[in-house]
Image: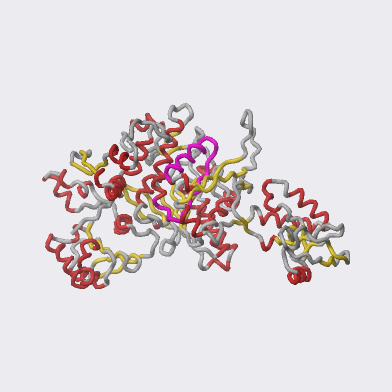
């Protein structure tokens, strides 16, 4: 019976196989680290295969830095890690489809490669900016702890790899580029073909980030760089006060995206629409005349945050409107239009009206034409209530000051959390049933935005948050409030934000998913002997009675199998008692597992009768090899239609 791998795929070897399928003559052999032969690529020959001319020399156009090759290698290396479920820190564990994962995001992204390959519609990340003060993730897993402490200058109490990338470091930009490059390589695999990635960044690395993204995703998949007005009045600079930051946007496959949105353009709510409408209502309450309100609105829309409402300065009983052109077409309707205010015909626009006489007359009767008394051309009324959304603009001017609601509403202090309005706007671009991933979760603004948006538009988006448990500074308000690390802040925010959203949207509360499953990165569930049995001597045999670590539960083992088999981690599951054993049924038969010892034949038969897509047992669950072999025969008996596939579908750990 085959054993489960319980380690992430070797992406390098997968790439070698893909190249070999296209260019078999470029595949050769090389000696691996274990001294054994393995497949390799003859790169000189491959380069020649891809060129009609003789390839000579090293000159080429490329973007590189110290450590780039190591970053690529690091992204492709398999790891022996797992995600341990933590129901006690979760909310609505049994029913939620949202995930909150604690751990180094590089390793977590590797673990998600099978379960979420091509399933994520949107990724938003706000990685640490390279300012010299932010913590950056280090990716050299081969140094000793002493080496780490000397090289990086910091190790937290849980031995997470963290360091400060100060500008006195000779590798200031290189370290940051290496950190983000490997993560983007893995993140791209998770995106669906119509998926998109949004990355917030500032001036220090914006140029480098765009080059990296063009290399990982392809230049043709670049969509835009959004400039976000932060409304900052900081004067820290000697020359120019920087009051913006960027959000770089790439597609997984822009051609697929073009086809998908050919008749369904991207749209987002106009910036700060609720605040603008509230301003209008306030002016009306103050008793201003319509003309006075119009003048106030003309002044208000000079501010960048209200620029989307330029020309929406007028209102009638239907509400706010702007004046649109009724002409501007060649060979239009040249019949004059009666002006009910001046009791005369208005002039005809050059080229004529864009609507026929009957349509113009109907619009006039409905009060949808703005007439003037000074002889100006009539204009059509375009109501704001009918134009609440627009194509996303490359300049966004919503308020980017720190979100005070973190303290006021949730009592979860966090320095400079991202503005909920911005995240909600970009999340609203993708399908309403999308999976949204943020692997620099921070204060979990993205999770909050997903829940808020679902409540407002009855969507069914799911989120996956990933965050390393970075310790809170002992002098910070968060630490004083009892939060030991950033993950504790993020989880508490999601809990409180979810309850607040349900209270504010009672009509949507019943079907709203405001829960999350907490999973924590950990070493493999298996002892070393599982991976290298030939390295053990006779004296170690007693320890080999069980190859599973003593502190691991059946739930730990189940989720380890889900990762190895590439099943989503958010589906429902249940347990049943059966002939003295416990069987675990995942998503009603996608996987059935039994991790007990001395599993009787009756239990194997009962599982086989259910015809699961996959089944897994504990290696130590059977007393002898013949008993394990008999498992296959039992499954073949009850699943004859799948007999040839049984060895793939039934495994042990």
Q: How many marks can you see? A: 0
Judge by depth and name the residue closer to the eye, 625 or 485.
Answer: 625
Residue 316, position in %: x, y? Answer: 78, 63
Residue 653, position in %: x, y? Answer: 23, 56
Quarter holding residue 389: bottom right
Judge by depth and name the residue closer to the eye, 146 or 50.
Answer: 50
Residue 44, position in %: x, y? Answer: 29, 37
| Region in magenta | 189-216
Task: Determine whether 54 is above or below 357 in the image.
Answer: above
Residue 375, position in %: x, y? Answer: 86, 58
| Display coloring | secondary structure
- Residue 287 seen in the figure: no
Task: Determine whether 63 is above or below 111 in the image.
Answer: above
Task: Determine whether 260 is above or below 484 in the image.
Answer: below
Residue at 72% x, 57% y is 328
Residue furthest toward the right?
343
Q: Is residue 442 left or right of residue 372?
A: left
Quarter holding residue 651: bottom left
Residue at 26% x, 64% y is 615
Residue at 76% x, 48% y is 299
């Amino acid at each position: 019976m085959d054993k489960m791998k319980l380690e992430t795929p070797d992406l390098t070897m997968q790439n070698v196989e893909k190249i070999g399928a296209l260019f078999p003559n470029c595949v050769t052999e090389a000696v691996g680290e274990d001294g054994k032969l393995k497949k390799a690529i003859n790169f000189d020959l491959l380069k020649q295969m891809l060129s009609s001319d003789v390839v000579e020399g090293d000159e080429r156009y490329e973007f590189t830095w110290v450590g780039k090759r190591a970053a690529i290698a690091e992204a492709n290396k398999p790891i022996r890690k797992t995600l341990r479920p933590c129901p006690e820190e979760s909310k609505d564990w049994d029913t939620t489809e949202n995930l909150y994962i604690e751990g180094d995001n590089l390793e977590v992204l590797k673990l998600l490669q099978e379960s979420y390959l091509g399933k994520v519609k949107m990724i938003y990340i706000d990685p640490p900016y390279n300012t010299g003060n932010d913590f950056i993730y280090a990716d050299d897993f081969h140094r000793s702890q002493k080496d780490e402490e000397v090289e990086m200058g910091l190790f937290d109490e849980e031995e997470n790899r963290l360091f400060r990338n100060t500008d006195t470091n000779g590798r200031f930009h290189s370290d940051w580029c290496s950190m983000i490059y490997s993560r983007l390589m893995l993140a791209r695999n998770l995106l669906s073909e119509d998926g998109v990635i949004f990355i917030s960044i500032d001036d220090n690395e914006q140029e480098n980030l765009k080059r990296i993204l063009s290399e990982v995703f392809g230049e043709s998949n670049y969509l835009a760089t959004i400039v976000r007005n932060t409304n900052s009045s900081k004067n820290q600079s000697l020359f120019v006060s920087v009051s913006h930051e960027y959000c770089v946007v790439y597609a997984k496959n822009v051609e697929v995206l073009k086809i998908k949105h050919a008749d369904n353009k991207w749209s987002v709510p106009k910036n700060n629409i609720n605040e603008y409408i509230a301003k209008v209502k306030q002016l009306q309450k103050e008793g201003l005349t319509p003309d006075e309100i119009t003048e106030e609105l003309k002044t208000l829309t000079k501010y960048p945050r209200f620029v989307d409402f330029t020309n929406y300065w007028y209102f009638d009983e239907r509400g706010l409107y702007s004046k649109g052109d009724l002409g501007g077409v060649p060979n239009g309707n040249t019949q004059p239009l009666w002006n009910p205010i001046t009791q005369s015909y208005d002039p005809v626009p050059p080229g004529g009206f864009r609507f026929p006489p009957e349509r113009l007359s109907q619009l006039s009767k409905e009060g949808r034409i703005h007439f003037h008394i000074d002889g100006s051309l009539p204009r059509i009324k375009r109501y704001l209530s009918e134009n609440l959304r627009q194509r996303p603009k490359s300049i966004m001017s919503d308020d980017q000051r720190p979100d005070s609601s973190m303290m006021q509403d949730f009592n979860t202090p966090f320095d400079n959390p991202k503005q909920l309005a911005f995240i909600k706007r970009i999340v609203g671009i993708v399908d309403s049933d999308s999976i949204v991933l943020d692997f620099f979760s921070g204060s979990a603004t993205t999770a909050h935005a997903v829940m808020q948006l679902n409540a407002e538009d009855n969507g069914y988006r799911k989120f996956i948050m990933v965050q390393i448990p970075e310790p809170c500074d002992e002098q910070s308000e968060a630490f004083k409030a009892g939060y030991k690390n950033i993950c504790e802040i993020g989880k508490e925010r999601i809990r409180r934000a979810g309850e607040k959203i349900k209270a504010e949207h009672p009509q949507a509360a019943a079907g709203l998913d405001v829960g999350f499953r907490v999973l924590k990165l950990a070493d493999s569930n298996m002892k070393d002997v599982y991976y290298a049995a030939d390295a053990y001597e006779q004296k170690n045999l007693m320890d080999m009675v069980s190859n599973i670590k003593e502190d691991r539960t059946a739930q730990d083992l189940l989720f380890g199998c889900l990762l190895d088999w590439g099943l989503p981690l958010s589906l429902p599951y249940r347990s049943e008692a059966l002939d003295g054993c416990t069987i675990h049924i995942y998503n009603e038969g996608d996987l059935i597992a039994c991790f007990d010892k001395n599993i009787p034949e009756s239990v194997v038969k009962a599982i086989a009768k259910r015809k699961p897509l996959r089944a897994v047992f504990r290696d130590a669950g059977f007393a002898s090899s013949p008993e394990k072999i008999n498992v296959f025969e039992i499954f073949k008996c009850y699943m004859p239609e799948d007999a040839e596939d049984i060895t793939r579908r039934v495994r042990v750990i």
